Amino acid sequence: MFLYFFFRLELEADIVRHKPPRTKMLHITKTGQTMTDAILGPIPEAFFFTSLMGTKLMLRDSRWSKRTQPENLARLQRRISFWFEKSVKPTFNVIAKNHKIPKFARKVVEAFKGYDKKDRSAVDLHVALLTSASEHIFDACQGDLGSLTVEKARTWFNLMQSTSNCRIVKRASSTVKSEFGRILQKHQEDNLHGQSWNAESCTEYPFFDPESLFILVAYMVYLYTKSSEASRFSSKSKYAVVIEKKRMLEWENLSGKMFEHFFSVMSHGLHKTDTEEVANVQDVCFSLINLPYKDLHQYLQKHDVPSVSGLHSRVMGEFTSIFSTIAASSQFGDDYYVQKQMAFWTQVCANATSHAKMVKKTLQNREKVFMHSIRHRKCKKAYKPRSTYTFERDIFIMGHHSSLHWTHCTLQGRSARKYIVI
């Protein structure tokens, strides 16, 4: 009996000694790939920021405002402010609270935190984030990627090549600029020799979108910085880097000019709906979606002013449709990470729309007060609304078409003093 237990213990000990090590659990899709990639996989934050910019592009147009009555322009500005205050800002806070800094951005932010405050620049941070993202994409292309994903990667590097000619890169420090040029040189050399770009692979990342990633990186600068002129959303981020006010202002202007050029801001706007024939209005391709200009035209046939929150919901609906179609496919139907990201995107959409619906009556009351003040602004004892109208500090993506310029150029005197931009 004693020998039985002795040999049993020896056998169990031998099994433990030769037990294979545990492997890290990683969910793999049916095609052998994983969608947990921080850049190539689904990014709900990028979709939301892109939907914001798409909505702003559709509402932009000074030519439309010149042919519109001042009361209608005032109502549109009030609705944009209300949309930001009651829908965008709360949703942005939810995103900032749940945001997990990706690996490609973490190493950049940690490096910047080690710099002296005087040496920190928002321009350098933006260019360094683009460099790190490009390195991640380049390394991914060395593996087993499909032809469609590789083509998107080429689009990204073409965008980076154009970025290298912009003032924002030229104003970066020599170290950051050289690193940015190095990754572009690596791509050019690799492309010339026809190496690493695997066009035969079946591994695709359909969620990867260069334009959305480009917009996301710009918003990351706000997420990871602290400044008196920066967005107030960033103050809660534990990764925030303190940057001087003048350097933030410099970055905003340089980034805005770059976005104006790349996204052809002047070609978008309400002027595209200035026609009686719906057949003459065409939806415009933007990122993964088509901006719904036809729906906006139909709405303006019955109303004087666009429904800003309704338009944004429509744009987010386009992303939801794309997201759902890809996530429900046989390729990703069982992917836990994709389903998790889809659930978070659904939460973001619900948060953005629910706030606007709950305070619809408040918007109607504010519009009445606002229009009363506009009609009687020339009176000696004109009524001045006490409420402050807030707008997003979006000059870094909209340039000269941002709310910062628009509000101060269209309404002067008593009206202009009621606006603040955060």
Image (cartoon, grey):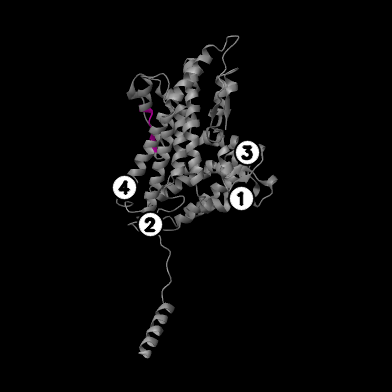
Magenta range is 289-294
Residue 244, position as x, y percentages in the image: 67, 40
**Label 1 belongs to which residue?**
178
- Sequence-first disc among 3 and 4: 3
Badge 1 density bin: few <14, some 14–19, many ≥20, Cα 10 Å? few
Residue ID at (58%, 51%): 108
**Magenta residue check for 414:** no
Can residue 215 be seen in this snapshot? no
Mark 2 falls on what kind of element? loop
Residue ID at (38%, 32%): 314
- Sequence-first disc among 1 and 3: 1
Q: CA distance from mark 3 to mark 4?
A: 42 Å
Q: Amino acid at mark 1?
A: Ser
**Label 4 belongs to which residue?**
328
Badge 3 density bin: few <14, some 14–19, many ≥20, Cα 10 Å? many
Q: CA distance from mark 4 to mark 1?
A: 43 Å
Badge nearest the viewer, 4 or 1? 4
Badge nearest the viewer, 2 or 1? 2
Q: Amino acid at mark 3?
A: Met
**Label 3 belongs to which residue?**
248
Disc 2 to disc 4: CB gap under 8 Å: no
| Residue 244 left/right relative to 155 | right
**Label 2 belongs to which residue?**
33
Q: CA distance from mark 2 to mark 1?
A: 33 Å
- Sequence-first disc among 2 and 4: 2
Q: Residue furthest left?
A: 330
Q: CA distance from mark 3 to mark 2?
A: 40 Å
Mark 1 falls on what kind of element? helix
Q: Amino acid at mark 2?
A: Gln
